[in-house]
Image (cartoon, rainbow, N blue to C red):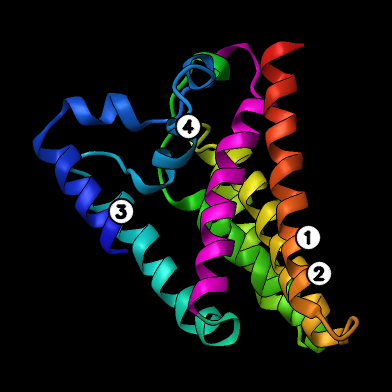
Amino acid sequence: MGICVVVWLLQTFVSAITSWVVMTPAVAGIQPWRFFTAPFAHVPGSLSHIGFNMLTLWLMGRYLEPILHARRFLLVYLLSGLGGSIFQVLLADQEGWYGSSLGASGAIFGLFGAYMVLAWLTGRSLTSMWVLLGLNVAIAVLFPSISWRGHLGGLLVGATTTLAITWPLLRGRSEHPQRWITLGVVGLAVALMLAVFLRYTV
């Protein structure tokens, strides 16, 4: 949250920064930092954009961070944000290829995915999360400028990362669960990078 707020303030007072941190698929292949910076940037001067995202991040973080612990929570968040950026490249149409997007919502959708995986593994009800996702889908339909590709990517990557992290721990996979966790996360990261490479070269 602190990083997002600092970046947003810099964007608000130094307008040129936004053009360097937004996710634009057409140029991200030669400026790869955009995959990582866009999830921390928001619409300059818009309190509603950063305010809603930070409120949602705070609410989800209060629940998930004590369960995943700080390092795993950070890993899920960062990979989800990266996954949101990657899916914008993988699923971009001609218009989206040259369009720009920014915001933490992809990473936040990753936290939604993490919640769903943890609820499934522990046998908790998913009704409230399905309702929340349904509302977000409706909002995306009503406001086409919202990047549904980033949301979808964040959701899928967040869920997959959480499953890779928690499954060995909860199921007691061998006497070395950390090894399986590392293999799972590294495998996911390699698959994402390979997909991006193919998108730009094939």
Tell me which label, 4 or 2, sits earlier in the chain: 4
Give the Cα separation between the discs numbered 1 and 3. Answer: 32 Å
Q: Report the residue marked by disc 2.
A: 180
Q: Quadrant of residue 193?
A: top right
Q: Quadrant of residue 13?
A: top left
Q: Position of residue 123 (x, y in %)?
A: 82, 88
Q: Report the residue marked by disc 1.
A: 184
Three-letter amino acid code at the position of disc 2? Trp
Q: Position of residue 11 (x, y in %)?
A: 19, 38
Give the Cα separation between the discs numbered 2 and 3. Answer: 36 Å
Give the Cα separation between the discs numbered 3 and 4. Answer: 16 Å
Q: Secondary structure at mark 1?
A: helix
Three-letter amino acid code at the position of disc 3? Ile
Q: Which mark is residue 145?
A: 4
Give the Cα separation between the discs numbered 4 and 2. Answer: 39 Å
Give the Cα separation between the discs numbered 1 and 4. Answer: 34 Å
Relative to 47, 36 lies left or right: right
Three-letter amino acid code at the position of disc 4? Ser
Labelled pair 2, 1 in contact (Cβ < 8 Å) = yes
Q: Report the residue marked by disc 3.
A: 50
Q: Which mark is residue 48?
A: none
Q: Quadrant of residue 129?
A: bottom right
Labelled pair 1, 3 in contact (Cβ < 8 Å) = no
Q: Secondary structure at mark 4?
A: loop
Q: Position of residue 187 (x, y in %)?
A: 78, 50
Q: Which residues are magenta?
A: 70-95
Three-letter amino acid code at the position of disc 1? Gly
User: Which residue: 24% across, 47% down?
Assistant: 7
Q: Secondary structure at mark 2?
A: helix
Q: Position of residue 120 (x, y in %)?
A: 80, 79
Q: Secondary structure at mark 3?
A: helix
